[in-house]
Image (cartoon, rainbow, N blue to C red):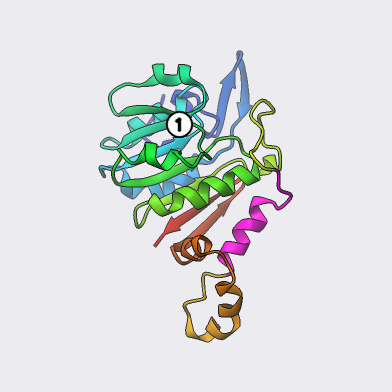
């Protein structure tokens, strides 16, 4: 029934990242992210690297990533300590708030992190905090994916409110980052440098390390230089 495409594996493990998924004997349309992800993930199938997913739900997508990436270490991050039970060979679990300042230290034991997927609270402010904090530890050529951008200021989980509430949508925030991508081109330096120099140093470094962005319905993917 299932072949080896990423969406096939998403269907096999019943993750809502796939084209369809099921719950309580009901079938639903999924987010349909996986067909788009495979366009840039396929060349990584045989690589040895670390993939980190923020937000695990029941661990379905972690099993999917493990089967798709035969040599990768898969790390799930969630606040539910009971998800420790999902650990198995090549799947590890960290119980942590993905926006905490201590979180990067918890990831330091893992090497060659080439993919980070934010499927966490879905609150815009939390997504920005995690991106700014974790993008620097991503390997060159790696991908940082933020999912479910339609959820808004308060996110998808009322029991886990964002640390701060901010009215700026992540789409707007992402466009702010992308406006600066041409700052290194001499034709634009005079126009953009004054604005760029007023940004916090960490934001300057973030913007100068983005090689490209890919926007798909509901999500955005950043590739690191």
Front residue of 36/100: it is 100
Quadrant location, the C terminus: bottom left
Residue 197, picture quadrant: bottom right
Residue tagged by mark 1?
A: 77
Across and down, in percent, residue 50 comes to: 33, 40
Q: Work out which residue is located at the far right of the displayed protein and give it.
A: 167
The correct choice, above or below, for 160 with respect to 211 in the image is: above
Per the image, label 1 sits on a secondary structure element best described as strand
Q: Work out which residue is located at the far top of the displayed protein and give it.
A: 25
Across and down, in percent, residue 62 comes to: 41, 29
The range drawn in magenta is 165-179
Q: How many marks?
A: 1
| Predominant SS along the magenta part | helix
Q: Residue at x 34, y 53 (%)?
A: 139
Residue 107, picture quadrant: top left
Across and down, in percent, residue 175 comes to: 62, 61
């Amino acid at each position: 029934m299932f072949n080896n495409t990423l969406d096939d594996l998403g269907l096999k493990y019943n993750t809502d990242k796939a084209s369809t998924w099921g719950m309580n004997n009901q079938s639903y349309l999924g987010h349909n992210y996986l067909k788009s992800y495979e366009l840039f993930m396929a060349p990584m199938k045989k690589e040895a690297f670390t993939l980190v997913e923020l937000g695990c739900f029941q661990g379905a997508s972690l099993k999917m990533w493990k089967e798709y990436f035969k040599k990768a270490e898969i790390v799930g991050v969630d606040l539910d300590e009971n998800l420790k039970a999902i650990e198995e060979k090549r799947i590890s679990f960290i119980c942590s708030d993905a926006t905490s300042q201590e979180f990067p230290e918890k990831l330091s034991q893992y090497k060659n992190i080439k993919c980070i997927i934010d499927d966490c609270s879905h609150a815009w402010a939390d997504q920005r905090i995690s991106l700014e904090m974790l993008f620097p530890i991503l390997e060159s050529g790696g991908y940082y994916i933020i999912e479910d951008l339609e959820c808004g200021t308060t996110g998808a989980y009322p029991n886990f409110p964002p640390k701060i509430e901010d009215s700026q949508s992540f789409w707007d925030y992402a466009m702010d980052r992308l406006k600066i991508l041409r700052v290194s081109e001499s034709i634009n330096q005079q126009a953009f440098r004054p604005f760029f120099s007023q940004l916090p140093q960490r934001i300057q470094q973030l913007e100068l390390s983005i090689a490209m962005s890919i926007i798909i319905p509901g999500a955005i993917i950043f590739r690191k230089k």
